[in-house]
Image: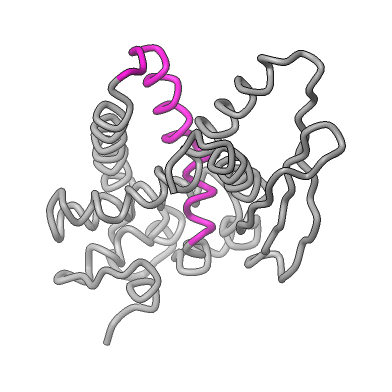
Amino acid sequence: MSHPLEEIIGYHFKDPQLLLTALTHTSFANESRETAQHNERLEFLGDSVLQIVSADYLFHAYADRPEGDLTRIRASLVSEDALFQFAQEIHLGEYLRLGKGEERCGGRNRPSVVSDAFEALIAAQYLDGGMEAAKTFILPFITEGKYAEADYKTKLQEVVQANPEEKLSYVVESENGPDHDKHYVVAVHLNSNCVARGEGRSKKTAEQHAAREALRLMGLVEE
């Protein structure tokens, strides 16, 4: 029987124990009467896999960008804030195995706990299916999520700054759904005019998509 998280991420483990370990926080392992492996070692490996996949993508996708830009963008991609956002998109916190104390303290929504588990999940897929499996999992997040914030919003701001009289702003037009599954619609405004809209599970993601749509309409990014 498959784990529900496998359906969400579109990957089925040959070794289910790897997934179980990735979802196990140290607090659960410490409180368990049975021997339970926690995810700290997987977190270490997952961080390295994420770094190389991100660096490889940026190096090839942005051959004209200098090293400093690539370093800045990669730092944004692998930050705790970014990983927490990625983890929320697959509702990772819901599937963590936490100790009672960590559960009471809101561990399922704690960025440090959830982002570490996301890195552990990357490592689990890497060990189970190789680099290609890990890369397939990682790329959609870094090309459509946090990366867009680091690049599309910056690029749009740079375009607008060419004319000092123009003012750029983002406006939340709607917010729906429960806390664990929000849906936002954000409009990007140039002065008082709405030029594009974007949607996402967080305000940041919706802003990213709105900026990309504005750039697309300007002919500055491809379809």
In this view, the residue in front, 157 or 100, is 157
Residue found 47% across the figure and 63% down from its top: 90
Q: Quadrant of residue 166?
A: top right
In this view, the residue in front, 109 or 158, is 158
Image: 127 above or below 11: above
Q: Is residue 42 left or right of residue 223?
A: left
Q: Tell me how many marks there are.
A: 0
Q: Main secondary structure of the magenta part?
A: helix
Q: Quadrant of residue 11?
A: bottom left
Residue found 63% across the figure and 57% down from its top: 199
| Residue 138 screen position, x and y as percent | 32, 49
| Residue 211 screen position, x and y as percent | 61, 40
| Residue 127 screen position, x and y as percent | 15, 54
Magenta segment boundaries in residue numbering: 64-89
Residue found 50% across the figure and 39% down from its top: 148
Residue found 64% across the figure and 50% down from its top: 206
Image: 109 above or below 189: below
Residue sitting at the far bottom: 1
In this view, the residue in front, 108 or 218, is 218
Quadrant where the N terminus lies?
Answer: bottom left
Q: Is residue 200 left or right of residue 34?
A: right
| Residue 141 screen position, x and y as percent | 41, 49
Q: Is residue 190 left or right of residue 24?
A: right
Residue sitting at the far right: 192
Q: Is residue 34 magenta?
A: no
Q: How is the image coloured?
A: one colour
